Image: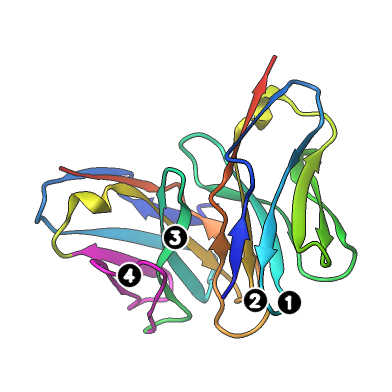
């Protein structure tokens, strides 16, 4: 019972480098989300998707791009990493808009 | 716009004592309410949710919460905590309709000591 799986779990980037975080869910959920968690800030929504081929901006979208080419996958990209993007990133999915979200284990990203 | 306020960033308690973690929300429309728990180095796990109906909601691990519309609150309670309840707790809200997403509070760290 995998649920929501995030890859990688840890990553260190140099300023200006790019990377892609992968989120995969096996629950056939329509909705998928990317959040970042920073100390004392709670979770803030970066981007989300309400179905395959759709994406929308959340609260803090700048510096990130996303794609949902397949229903089960939601990719988060950083084109040119900055130290301010050092954070823990969580992916989540939900079956419908009014049901609870299921979270992955997180990706700890450090930008130096 | 919705917002969620968790009034305490940290709550220290002794084992077997009762605890209440406070959550207030701000919304001009009806909302769904959730409590999530995050154990160290893990993702978030749903504790309980209020969608409609009875205002007292029971969740996993002996936790419960009460929805109070007049006070716009959704406080989380447990009558007797264990060491294993040490974790960060997040209150969250979302609108029942439209393409709404979860809005989280900043979290409350529950520290249970022997």
Q: Residue furthest right?
A: B54
Q: Which residue is mark 3?
A: A44
Check whether the beta carbons of the residues at disc 1 and disc 2 lie within 8 A of each other. Answer: yes
Q: x%, y% of residue B60?
A: 76, 45
- Tell me if residue B93 comes above or below residue B17 in the rendering: below
Check whether the beta carbons of the residues at disc 2 and disc 4 lie within 8 A of each other. Answer: no
The quarter of the image holding the C terminus of chain A is: top left
What residue is drawn where x is 81% and y is 60%? B67
- Please indicate, yes or no, whether residue A13 appears anywhere in the rendered image: yes
Label 3 or label 4, whichever comes before in sequence order: 3
* Left or right of A17 in this view: B74: right
Q: Are marks 2 and 4 on the same chain?
A: no
- Tell me if residue A83 comes above or below residue A92 in the rendering: above
Query: In terms of secondary structure, where does tag 2 sit?
Result: loop
Is A56 contained in the magenta span?
yes
Q: Which residue is mark 2?
A: B95
Determine which quarter of the picture holds residue A81.
Answer: bottom left
Chain under numbered label 1: B
Query: In terms of secondary structure, where does tag 1 sit?
Result: loop
What residue is drawn where x is 76% and y is 64%? B72
Check whether the beta carbons of the residues at disc 1 and disc 3 lie within 8 A of each other. Answer: no
What residue is drawn where x is 68% and y is 23%? B83
Query: In terms of secondary structure, where does tag 3 sit?
Result: strand
Disc number for residue B30: 1
Compute the Cα span from label 2 to label 3: 16 Å
Determine which quarter of the picture holds residue A60.
Answer: bottom left
Compute the Cα span from label 3 to label 4: 10 Å
| Residue stretch rendered in magenta on the structure | A54-78
């Amino acid at each position: 019972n995998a649920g929501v799986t995030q890859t990688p779990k840890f990553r260190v980037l140099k300023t200006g480098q790019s990377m892609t975080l992968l989120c995969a869910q096996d629950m056939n959920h329509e909705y998928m989300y990317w959040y970042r968690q920073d100390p004392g800030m709670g979770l803030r929504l970066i981007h989300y998707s309400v179905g395959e081929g759709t994406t929308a901006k959340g609260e803090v979208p700048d510096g990130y791009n996303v794609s949902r080419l397949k229903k089960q996958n939601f990719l988060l990209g950083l084109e040119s990493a900055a130290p301010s993007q050092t954070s823990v990133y969580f992916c989540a999915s939900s079956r419908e808009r009014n049901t609870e979200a299921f979270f992955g284990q997180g990706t700890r990203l450090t930008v130096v | 716009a919705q917002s969620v306020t968790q009034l305490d960033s940290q709550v220290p308690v002794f084992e077997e004592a009762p605890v209440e973690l406070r959550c207030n929300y701000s919304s001009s429309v009806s909302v769904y309410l959730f409590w999530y728990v995050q154990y160290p180095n893990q993702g978030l796990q749903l504790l309980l949710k209020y969608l409609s109906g009875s205002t007292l909601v029971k969740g996993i691990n002996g936790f419960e919460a009460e929805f109070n519309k007049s006070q716009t609150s959704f406080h989380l309670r447990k009558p007797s905590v264990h060491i294993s309840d040490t974790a960060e707790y997040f209150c969250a809200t979302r609108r029942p309709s439209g393409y709404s997403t979860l809005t989280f509070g900043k979290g409350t760290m529950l520290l249970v000591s022997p």
